[in-house]
Image: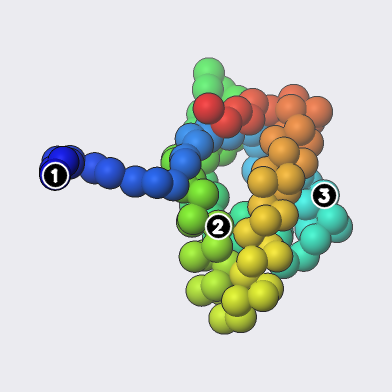
Amino acid sequence: MKIRHGFVSNSSSSSFCIITTKDDYDKALQKVEKWDTDVSILLKNILGVWKKIDLKGVKGIALYGTIYSDSYYDAAYEIFQEASIAEKVSELAYDAMDILFNEIDKLGGFAEQY
């Protein structure tokens, strides 16, 4: 019998970093919201709180962290309290992240998943 020690997980994860202005972040979130309101609510919840930054006099915000694949469903269920909605929203979350990141890039910010 094999015994595993340390962290063991079957869920995949991705880390992210976003650096942009608060206005451009809000515009990018609005684009996601037009695409799907429920998914926008989920992303706001998962991405968390941004930090104010000042890069040589240019003010902006930064968000960073790691998202596990099961985090989308867990957060969606906590928000909407219904399994069918949580499943739908969590499946759309990956596409919504792409929309958000592409929009931030278009607006001149930095958004990367790795």
Distance CA(mark 1)–CA(mark 3): 51 Å
Distance CA(mark 2)–CA(mark 1): 33 Å
Q: Is residue 32 left or right of residue 22?
A: right
Q: Secondary structure at mark 3?
A: helix
Q: At which x and y percent is residue 46?
A: 53, 55
Dot 2 or dot 1, earlier in sequence = 1
Q: At which x and y percent is residue 17?
A: 53, 32
Dot 2 or dot 3, earlier in sequence = 3
Residue density around tag 3, few if under 14, some if 14–19, many if 20 or more, within 10 Å: some
Q: At which x and y percent is residue 54?
A: 51, 29
Per the image, the residue denoted by label 3 is 31
Q: Is residue 23 visible?
A: no
Between label 2 and label 3, give the one nearer the viewer: 2
Residue density around tag 1, few if under 14, some if 14–19, many if 20 or more, within 10 Å: few
**Relative to residue 33, is residue 111 depicted above or below?**
above
Q: Secondary structure at mark 1?
A: loop
The N terminus is located in which quarter? Answer: top left
Q: Is residue 37 visible?
A: yes
What is the quadrant of residue 110 in the picture? top right
Q: Residue at x 72, y 54 (%)?
A: 92
Distance CA(mark 2)–CA(mark 3): 19 Å
Q: Is residue 65 left or right of residue 87?
A: left
Between label 1 and label 3, give the one nearer the viewer: 1
Dot 1 or dot 3, earlier in sequence = 1
- Amino acid bearing label 1: Met
Q: Which mark is residue 1?
A: 1
Per the image, the residue denoted by label 2 is 72
Q: Residue at x 78, y 46 (%)?
A: 27
Q: Residue at x 48, y 35 (%)?
A: 15
- Amino acid bearing label 2: Tyr
